[in-house]
Image (tube, coloured by chain):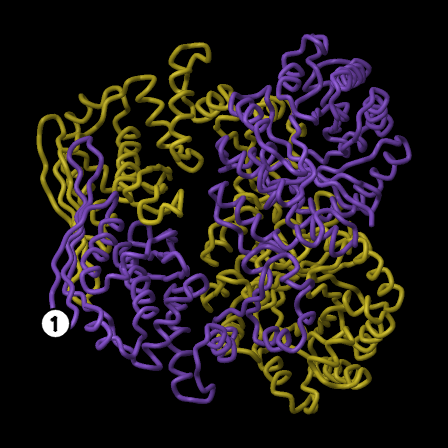
Chain colours: A purple, B yellow
Amino acid sequence: MKKILIYDTTLRDGSQGEHISFSVEDKLHILKKLDELGVDYVEGGWPGSNRKDIDFFRRAQGLKLRHTKVAAFGSTRHPRRSAARDPNLQALIEANTPVVTIFGKAWNLHVKVALGISLEENLGLIRESVAFLKSKGKEVVYDAEHFFDGFKADPAYALATLAAAEEAGADTLVLCDTNGGTLTADICEHFRAASQRVRTPLGIHTHNDGEMAVANSIAAVQQGAVHVQGTFNGYGERCGNANLCSVIPGIELKLGLRCLGKKGLKRLTEISHYVSELANLPPRSDLPYVGKSAFAHKGGIHVSAVMKERAAYEHVDPAVVGNERRVLVSELSGRSNVLYKAEELGLKIDRASPAAKVVVDKLKEMEHDGYQFEGAEASFEILFNKLVHHSREFFELAGFRVITEKQGANESYSEAVIKLRVDGKEEHTAAEGVGPVSALDRALRKSLTTFFPCIQDIRLTDYKVRVLNPKGATDAKVRVLIETSDGHDTWGTVGVSENIIEASWQALVDSITFKLKKEYGYRRQDRQARAAK
Amino acid sequence: MKKILIYDTTLRDGSQGEHISFSVEDKLHILKKLDELGVDYVEGGWPGSNRKDIDFFRRAQGLKLRHTKVAAFGSTRHPRRSAARDPNLQALIEANTPVVTIFGKAWNLHVKVALGISLEENLGLIRESVAFLKSKGKEVVYDAEHFFDGFKADPAYALATLAAAEEAGADTLVLCDTNGGTLTADICEHFRAASQRVRTPLGIHTHNDGEMAVANSIAAVQQGAVHVQGTFNGYGERCGNANLCSVIPGIELKLGLRCLGKKGLKRLTEISHYVSELANLPPRSDLPYVGKSAFAHKGGIHVSAVMKERAAYEHVDPAVVGNERRVLVSELSGRSNVLYKAEELGLKIDRASPAAKVVVDKLKEMEHDGYQFEGAEASFEILFNKLVHHSREFFELAGFRVITEKQGANESYSEAVIKLRVDGKEEHTAAEGVGPVSALDRALRKSLTTFFPCIQDIRLTDYKVRVLNPKGATDAKVRVLIETSDGHDTWGTVGVSENIIEASWQALVDSITFKLKKEYGYRRQDRQARAAK
């Protein structure tokens, strides 16, 4: 099977995305992960542009990689410097990577405006820079910046720049749609022209400014590209780069060519989330293949059809890319989705019973108020048991008070006081925290540990706040999602209120209730709670 | 110039997206906006599926639309009912719209699995349903569901379903990539086959499961489609529908065909934000054409080149779609971006001065700590004036205390106490709010109004919270972004802390400082403040 090489530039072009800033540690973590996944090349940064990238290359040399070749990125030499005395090329050599990628100008406009030299001089720049790197024993990837815009302006010149890099010995020539605005049909046509002119293996590098980066990459592979550049989750400057999380399954599952292989493909969803975690950006739920909604069905017709036949509304099997099917609950979906969801969580209910209607109605009302049970299945289960089995609370709140104080220019200080009752016994305690929610969380857990020692095992692993109607400003409603773990299991809970403390409180109470239910069961809680003491 | 008809289904297919739920009011607002914009068709909902959509169509009849035709959506008749007695078709007639869109099955798999009838019976369903709607005087759009998957499975049958709808008088035949997994090259080939078989005008409806919905729509137009379906911002089930915010400028600016015209195109960014506002989803900043980052330059090289020549790194002029260029500040961008940004805000600084270095260093340090000045230009300006002009504070905080209390099952209650000093005079006051931040905001403004009456003019118009490291759970750092308006101007400010009250405080202080600076100027604030009293 033909193999297509994957060249990841999340660490370089990806970090040009707004809101993205990787630490050196983050970059090393991602590099290791991409190596595990079987990515062929990882472009680590531009050693000529900042200290952080120089650091990265120094530390990356210490890693034992199994598969990935690390590439350092830079440009052709400065117009007024020889290759041997160009500090940028020097920095590329010092990065000490097996692969060096340099970009050169393919667009006559750029040669004139950005470099201010003649078209002929630019060809010399390309030739000498590539030859210099080859003389140092590097594998050289040559990025033809703005190839497609250049081809539109002056096809012969754009092709001549490729030929210059080829003559000088470049190992791969990558055609770049740097401005990201080229149409798929033009990508195909210009790619064909290039493949008729040069014999060096060709690659493709696209941006998403026309929302076509993935389609353009796949089309180029169909035209013979054997090397594809992109980033995880499509991160990158402006509208981003070609999203490898869509390009890779496109190549493997739709074109039937090989890049990561089956094992790698199965880890795609996991790695996509890992990278967004380190980028400190919420994973986009609508991302193709790897997003949480990618195989989520909401319409009632879709749900019932997909139950009968997977292919009915799924273009690929979610398991192949490590993702899963989900069924959503909403006013569009009706009874069958709600009940499907309950069954999925192992909750039993007679579909025709009046209790089923109570659950459906209550859920719709709560979703309308801003609750969301995706990612908060524990809250769903607690609610379900309350409505269907009339389960009682494990504890009763007498009251709490959360205080945040600031004196002059000092940092704010938060503390919480709480009074709870369990079986008629009262516990009155206090705790401090870095903020009001943290103080409340600590006070709540401190007071309950006396009654339920298992509370000590749990810790919050995630806390998210979403302002539901930002235009309401500080009076807006907020939704808090909390994730809790006890070392074995992880569960999510939700709270909604105009008061962020109240919303957090709801999610905290559900988080603890879920743990207590795990330990003591719902129905027998009074008896068990007593026994536990 | 050839005209391509735009068919918007944000209100129907778009609302199948996870996290999307429009009220009837929202839907009517969006319909009016799309009419203003010049969208040809708006699909309002499925009257056969829920009460909300029936309501919508009833109320939509009362609107005076200038351009848009409203369409009601449904399916071909039930296999065991005649067209005249089918409740779904009945509901479509009762919706009382000029246009009715129905989908029928083009994929033999679906006919068998979802409908459980013979291929021949399905052709009858299509023919009779279309003919029935035509007999009622409707313009009929026929959506060939799963046309492309159907074509792959059985080309002759998929084409036969189109012919059936054509014979019965359908006005437009829309080829749907319902599962969203078809490659662009296949879209082109199958589209050509359809256009050779039928003479009715053809449309295209794509989904984004392969991240190719926009490329596939544009490719279909190049193959002769004259009607394009999609949604604003690409909302829709799973990975969404073709994003009209990219399709429309693609058609107008890249293919040179007409759909909205220049005036409509200029409003695209505004309407994209309007729809995301009503969908209650944050606008995606990396959206092509209309996103906040779509023309944002971060790399130093890009910034300096784009200053010389717009086309250097911009595929279209941002003004044409109502967007604008931005220059970002980050560790990648260096000195020139920071100073460009300062100049953009009208702040003067000698680029070579030691003060310029102080500003650049401080900004980089703060961005590293989680501050973000995009959308918080007022905070940037205040900081700049502090560092460069050593401007003094308008007021001094002695201290505040914010208390949130909850008694038993009652809703939480928040109040704030604050003590401030202005020119040696102290003001000690208190206020309550729906949450702790709202209470603090009110107390702060109440106390300052005594000294600076102009504070009464301002109100907060937006409040956003972002948890920067969610894994830190309730100890995580949060960034608060506030937007303030005084009726004339709107400005954004930012605060960062592990304590949400502290972060909100920073943003609130900047928000008020910016207003006071507007009124009294920075340098003369002591004198002016006294005069104001």
Horizontally, residue A110 falls left or right of residue A470, namely right
**Mark 1 element type:** loop
Please tell me in which quadrant of the rendered image residue B35 appears: bottom right
Which of A144 and B27 lies nearest the eye of the viewer? A144
Q: Give residue B9's position: percent from left, percent from top.
A: 61, 64
Horizontally, residue B75 falls left or right of residue A127, namely left
- Residue B77 versus residue A239 in the image, above or below: below
Please tell me in which quadrant of the rendered image residue A320 appears: bottom right
Q: Which residue is at a point 11% across and 43% down the rendered structure image?
A: B429
- The residue pinned by badge 1 equals A424
Q: Which residue is at a point 66% across and 66% down the rendered structure image?
A: A314
Residue type, label 1: Gly
Position of the C terminus of chain A, as image quadrant, is bottom left
Q: Residue furthest right?
A: A196
Horizontally, residue A393 falls left or right of residue B472, namely left
Which of B143 and B79 lies nearest the eye of the viewer? B79
Q: Chain of mark 1?
A: A
Horizontally, residue B350 falls left or right of residue A390, namely right
Q: Which residue is at a point 21% across and 63% down the rendered structure image?
A: B411
Which of B483 and B405 lies nearest the eye of the viewer? B405
How crowded is the residue under tag 1: few (<14 C-alpha within 10 Å), some, or many (20+)? few
